[in-house]
Image (spheres, rainbow, N blue to C red):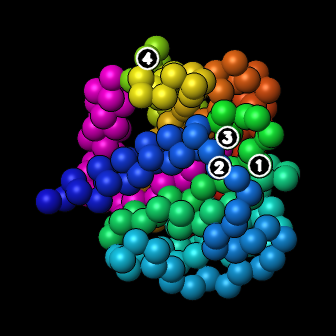
Amino acid sequence: MKLTGTIAALLAVVALTAAAAACGGDDDTTGAPGTATAEATSDQSGNVTPFPTPLIDGSNIVSDSKGYSVTMPATWHERINFIQTIDSSVDAFLEPLAPGAKAQANITITCTVPGRFAEQERIDLLKTTTARQGLNENIVVGSRTVDGKAATTLTYINYSQQNPDQPRLAKTDVLFSTAKCDYTITTLSVEADIAKYQPIFDQFFATMKLIQ
């Protein structure tokens, strides 16, 4: 079914949200910060990803195959191809988990092979998925641009009924499509700290360039 890869990618990002809220840590996976990593196909899920690993040089990430370059926040670390399906891949950028912290600020870039759905159909699907999760509230639909590309935003608060120790999390999904990817870029921080992290998220987007 065509929906499988897209839904799997969505669920993967939800899983990352839970993991970031629960623990985190500074352990690295593909490409340690400060090193240059050549593009090579990575296979962490048992499926062959259609997206090779980006080039990594310090805080600078360049992915010709996924069609973006970006500078991650200082002191953060990347987990490239952190989650994969047969037609999508998630690149995660995470703040080091502070001692005693119950959540870890992060940014994820989900790139799905384009063309599964018309752009508006995909946006409507993601809006519906977000609204139906039940643990999301105050969902606000907005817009922004990413390197001049118009994008739809979904901003909301996520909380956990299973884990009362998890703080309320502020999330924003940024949705747009290019010739290389159907993008969902998600920012996450503790709701009480959103004023601290919003400038960091805005700077991340300011550095992002879309590669044709």
Mark 1 neighbour class, 10 Å CA radius: few under 14, some 14 to 19, many 20 or more: some
| The C terminus lies in quadrant | bottom right
Q: CA distance from mark 4 to mark 1?
A: 27 Å
Pinpoint residue 76: horizontal percent, then vertical percent. Answer: 78, 53
* Disc with the residue nearer the chain's start (4 vs 2): 2
Residue at (64, 73) in percent of width and height: 30
Q: Is residue 180 above or below residue 201?
A: below
Disc 3 target residue: 104
Pinpoint residue 209: horizontal percent, then vertical percent. Answer: 67, 56
Residue at (57, 25) in percent of width and height: 165
Q: Which residues are magenta?
A: 106-134
* Disc with the residue nearer the chain's start (3 vs 1): 1
Q: Are marks 2 and 3 in contact (CB under 8 Å)?
A: yes
* Disc with the residue nearer the chain's start (2 vs 1): 2
Describe the element under mark 4 as helix, strand or loop: strand
Disc 1 target residue: 96
